[in-house]
Amino acid sequence: MKRHGSMLVELMAAAVLLAAAGAISVELAAAVGAGRRAIADRQLALQEAANLMERLTAMPLGDLSSESARNLPLSAEGQRLPGAKTTIEITDVDGPLAAVRVAVSIRWEDRGGVPLPPVRLVAWRYP
């Protein structure tokens, strides 16, 4: 018995399966790329927060205030974070050991404009 045209049907089925596998691969590559960008942005935000914290804690204790902290911008690289907003809180803490609490927080958005969880660092300065 001859099977005319069965090879054509098999080739069409293989092409459909190959196209489906290709589409899934493209979607997976896009998801991996988005995940890598999110991780890189979070790492950049953490590095920027650490840099701000280092600059704040290096200031003389008498100069450390909310007004002086407002003048500390993000670096040029840190400004590439979409919608980046920096919050710096400086609080005097009274008690047996007087201290200054310094908190740095950086918020930003993903490429779609959705706010992401912030990066937050806290340090204590003692006289």
Image (tube, rainbow, N blue to C red):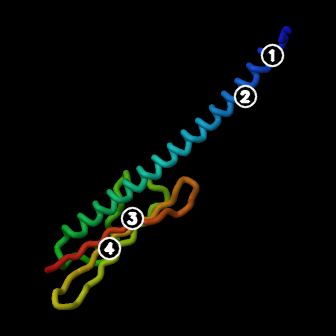
Of the numbered discs in the image, which one, if any, rests on residue 50?
none
Q: Position of residue 123 (x, y in %)?
A: 25, 72
For marks 2 and 3 on the same chain, the one whose residue lies earlier in the sequence: 2
**Residue depicted at x 54% and y 53%:** 111
Q: Secondary structure at mark 3?
A: strand
Q: Secondary structure at mark 2?
A: helix
Q: Position of residue 106 (x, y in %)?
A: 40, 65
Within 10 Å of disc 1 (Cα), the crowding (few <14, some 14-19, many 20+) is: few
For marks 1 and 2 on the same chain, the one whose residue lies earlier in the sequence: 1
Distance in Å between CA atoms under marks 1 and 4: 71 Å
Distance in Å between CA atoms under marks 3 and 1: 61 Å
Residue assigned mark 4: 103
Q: Quadrant of the C terminus?
A: bottom left
Relative to 62, is 2 on the left or the right?
right
For marks 4 and 3 on the same chain, the one whose residue lies earlier in the sequence: 4
Task: Say what amino acid the circle numbered 2 marks.
Answer: Val
Residue assigned mark 2: 16
Distance in Å between CA atoms under marks 4 and 3: 11 Å
Is residue 10 or residue 118 the one in the foreground? 10
**Relative to 64, residue 111 above or below:** above
Residue assigned mark 3: 119
